[in-house]
Amino acid sequence: MSALAAVRTAVRDYLTAVDLPGEVCVAVSGGADSVALAEAAAYVARRHGFHTRALVVDHGLQEGSADVAAEAAAVVRKLGVERAEVHAVDVTGKGGPEAAARTARYRALREALSGGEGLVLLGHTLDDQAETVLLGLGRGSGPRSLAGMRPHDPPWGRPLLGITRAQTREACAELGVQPWQDPHNEDPRFTRVRLRSEVLPLLEEVLAGGVAPALARTAAQLRDDTEALDTLAALVHERAKEAGELDTAVLATEPAALRRRVLRRWLLESGVRELTDAHLRSVDALVARWRGQGGVWLPGNLEARRCRGRLSLAGPEPEPTTRGE
């Protein structure tokens, strides 16, 4: 099977397995992955009766970025995408340029969806999945991170997680298209670039090849395990939760893996953001290692407390007012 046929088949199999909306959006950067994805989506759309729209995000981080974005939109229109539009964003915020650009890009893609609903296809490949798993492993991020990116995570769809970057480049060559080469993808200041250009090639050499597919398989296996545990944790959560609080007696009988998943779900639903493993383990100690200790302060100036066998979440006590106010 040619590379172009492999990409088209992957996109067809993905789109025919999901509940398709009338229109599918494709995030397009102009690189080989997103261009090959956009062409495949348009190819499948013509045969299955839905519309396609390309969303090109101009981050404005490089000179001439507006021209690059306009050219990317023009290329995918020539390849059969019905509509292509450019969305300029302002990249600001914490976490460095990579994180800020990613945040701005995903926000723009969400906002571009009609009525906030729909499906946006992303050009993440098997190689991206392997890098994600390695990053999670190196950072000690736990099984949820090692499980990698989900193929279907509405509104995001990733049909190419079984396709390599080499295949998307070959597909573009078959189409007679010269994709844009983002200079940031060669800049060693970025962690992913060094992982891609230094770490993975070394692992391929030491382990005699096949590292990226092996990491992707590991992600798929861990994703299955994680989803199974999350399903069980949801049942425990329903038994333990009452009036926004959790019954520690219910939680105490559960294995740590389920207990912490219940706590994570409860905290996220209660509005805690930027939750770390350290936060989660500290709250878990209120159940598993209870010795009458005080509460646990969490992001958002919230405190998890245990009282009379129940966990609750509260903000800081209001400041007492002075007389006359």
Image (spheres, rainbow, N blue to C red):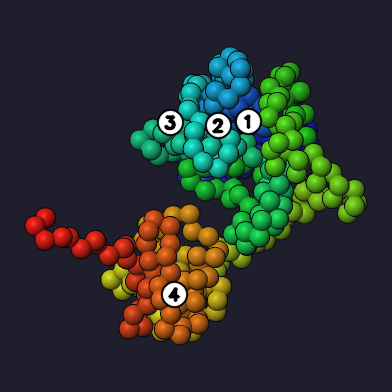
Dots 4, 1 in contact, CB < 8 A: no
Tell me the residue that label 2 is attached to. 27
Comes first in the chain, label 4 or label 1: 1
Residue, x 68% and y 22% (percent of image)?
180
User: In terms of sequence position, does the residue under pointer 4 or pointer 3 come before the other?
Assistant: 3
Q: Nearer the viewer, residue 227 or 51?
A: 227
Q: Residues within 10 Å of mark 1 (few under 14, many from 20)?
A: many
Q: Is residue 316 visible?
A: yes
Q: Is the Cβ of the residue at disc 1 closer than 8 Å to that at disc 2?
A: yes
x and y percent of residue 81 in the render? 55, 23
Q: Which residue is mark 3?
A: 112
Q: Is residue 71 visible?
A: no
Report which residue position mark 1 lands on: 34
Tell me whether the residue at label 4 lies in contact with that at label 2, contact meaning CB atoms closer than 8 angstroms. Answer: no
Q: Quadrant of residue 189?
A: top right
Report the amino acid beneath label 1.
Ser
Front residue of 51 and 114: 114
Task: Give the residue displayed 48% in from the left and 27% down from the top.
Answer: 89
Q: Earlier in the sequence, mark 1 or mark 3?
A: 1
Disc sitting over residue 232 in the figure: none
Instruction: Identify which residue is drawn at 81% across, 42% down.
Output: 198
Of pointers 4 and 2, the one earlier in the residue sequence: 2
Amino acid type at circle 4 is Val
Label 4, residues with CA under 10 Å away: few <14, some 14-19, many ≥20:
some
Establish if 197 lies above or below 257: above
What residue did someone put label 4 on?
236
Q: Quadrant of residue 217?
A: bottom right
Q: Look at the image and tell me in which quarter the N terminus lies.
A: top right
**Would you call the spot at circle 2 few (<14 residues within 10 Å), some (14-19), or many (20 or more)?**
many
- Between the residue at mark 4 and the residue at mark 3, the CA separation in whole angstroms equals 37 Å
Q: CA distance from mark 2 to mark 3?
A: 10 Å
- Work out whether 148 lies above or below 105: below
